[in-house]
Image (spheres, rainbow, N blue to C red):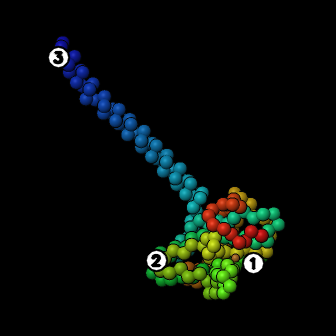
Amino acid sequence: MRSSIRDAARVAINTYPFSRLRSFGERIGIVAFTMMLLFAMSQSLWAHEFKAGDIEIVHPWSRATPDGAKVAAGYLTLKNDGSEGDRLVSVSGEIAGKTEVHEMAVDASGVMTMRPVEGGVEIPAGGTVELKPGGFHIMFMGLRQGVKEGEAFKGTLTFEKAGSIDVEFDVQAIGGAAGHDDHGG
Ligand SMILES: [Cu+2]
């Protein structure tokens, strides 16, 4: 009798922590899985990607424009996974009559200006180029419609070697993301 109580106690002591651990582990697993799902969803929402040949196009976005604006800027990151350099030679956007690729530069008198990039933006083999506020950017001109936060619009990128690919530009808040922008309107 006494020994069977002792046995039962020992069994309880030995198995109870394990069952606790297992269910704790399962709970961790469920939480981790949920986090992974949420992460994957947020990635697809906020850092959508496109691929043309060896070129990865990461998160094309644009900034919402004030009413009546005639221009909007577009930004994205280009990664070249290939062993040869390539160039982004042209862009078009469904919202714009004309689209150019620009770069910011300081002119002789020290004033920040922008100008079309001659021959396109080079993306070196294995390299990454960011089109971002204050640097290279896409300039959508002669806007047919305003660019509103939370919406998206279609565009086409053309690379010298990787060819053309349709992408979507996410429109972020007017004050969104980092950096100044000289293309307010
Ligand atoms: Cu510009």
At label 2, counting other C-alpha atoms closer than 10 Å, the crowd grade (few under 14, some 14-19, many 20 or more) is some
Q: Please name whichever residue, 76 or 10, is drawn nearer the observer in this view of the structure.
A: 76
Q: Horizontally, is 8 left or right of 92 in the view?
A: left
Residue at the limit of the structure toward the top, as seen here = 1
Q: Which mark is residue 3?
A: 3
Q: What residue is disc 1 on?
A: 98
State the image quarter where residue 9 is shown: top left
Q: Please name whichever residue, 47 or 107, is drawn nearer the observer in this view of the structure.
A: 107
Residue 112 drawn at (x, y percent)? 67, 78
- N-terminal-most mark, 1 or 3: 3
Q: Secondary structure at mark 2?
A: loop
- Quadrant occupied by the C terminus: bottom right
Residue 178 drawn at (x, y percent)? 62, 64
- N-terminal-most mark, 2 or 1: 1
The alpha-carbon separation of the residues under discs 2 and 3 comes to 71 Å
Amino acid type at mark 1: Lys
At label 1, counting other C-alpha atoms closer than 10 Å, the crowd grade (few under 14, some 14-19, many 20 or more) is some
Q: Is mark 2 within 8 Å of ligand 1?
A: no
Q: Please name whichever residue, 47 or 154, is drawn nearer the observer in this view of the structure.
A: 47
Tell me which image quadrant ligand 1 sits in. bottom right
Above/below status of 111 relative to 7: below
Q: Horizontally, is 170 left or right of 126 in the view?
A: right
Judge whether residue 96 can be spotted in this image: no
Amino acid type at mark 3: Ser
State the image quarter where residue 114 is shown: bottom right
The alpha-carbon separation of the residues under discs 1 and 3 comes to 90 Å
- Quadrant occupied by the N terminus: top left
The alpha-carbon separation of the residues under discs 2 and 1 comes to 31 Å
At label 3, counting other C-alpha atoms closer than 10 Å, the crowd grade (few under 14, some 14-19, many 20 or more) is few
Q: Which mark is residue 126?
A: 2
Judge whether residue 113 can be spotted in this image: yes
